[in-house]
Amino acid sequence: MKENTSGPYTGGCACGAIRYEIPGEPMVMVDCQCRDCQRKSGTGHGSYLAFPGRASVKLTGKATHWDLAGDSGNMKTRAFCPTCGSPVYLTSAAMPDHFTVHAASLDDPGRYKPQMVFYKASGYAWDKLDPALPTFDRMPPKPDAG
């Protein structure tokens, strides 16, 4: 399959009831090995693309939302399709302008290029991720604003 390397990022759930279109490039693409992501994905990690500018996301369909406290104590909301159960996106109360999608929900998952690994301390030896990626035992520190 030929990769789409330009234009908006598009995707949705497995049955097509939820769709999104996101202009621009993601801020970061990450693999996360926290227990929440392991449980949500049914495997050793979750893979995500985080975008700035939630207001510019074109979203159609109605997702079911599930709120939970992250390791930091901040609330995050996971959105999945009530028909097929596919996880599609997540948002966070701590970063309300960000919109994060699951890499497998992309129409072209080949556009996903992981840049780092979060929560490596929770990872398992059987979950083989790219050893060249920078890793963080938990969330990486936020960059200084000035």
Image (spheres, grey):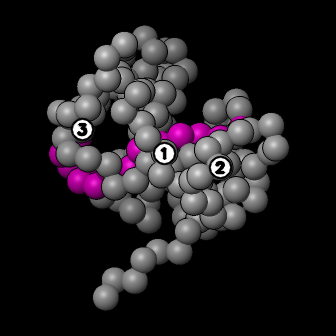
Residue occupied by mark 2:
131
Residue occupied by mark 1:
114
Residue occupied by mark 3:
22
Q: Position of residue 64 (x, y in %)?
A: 47, 31
Q: Quadrant of the C terminus?
A: bottom left
Q: Secondary structure at mark 1?
A: loop
Is 140 in the magenta?
no
Name the N-terminal-most of marks 1 and 2. 1
The amino acid type of the residue labelled 3 equals Ile
Q: Position of residue 137 (x, y in %)?
A: 69, 64
73 vs 76, left or right, is right
Badge 3 density bin: few <14, some 14–19, many ≥20, Cα 10 Å? many
Q: Secondary structure at mark 3?
A: strand
Q: Position of residue 18 (x, y in %)?
A: 35, 22
In this orientation, which residue lies closer to the viewer: 7 or 39?
7
In this orientation, which residue lies closer to the viewer: 115 or 50?
115
Quadrant of residue 90 in the image? top left
Name the N-terminal-most of marks 1 and 3. 3
Q: Secondary structure at mark 2?
A: loop
Q: Quadrant of the N terminus?
A: top left
Circles 1 and 2, Cβ within 8 Å, touching? The answer is no
Residue placed at 19% from the left, 41% from the top? 23
Residue placed at 80% from the left, 37% from the top? 126
Q: Position of residue 140 (x, y in %)?
A: 55, 68
109 vs 43, left or right, is left
Name the N-terminal-most of marks 3 and 2. 3
- Report the span colored magenta: 44-62
The amino acid type of the residue labelled 2 equals Pro
* Residue 38 badge: none
Residue placed at 80% from the left, 45% from the top? 124
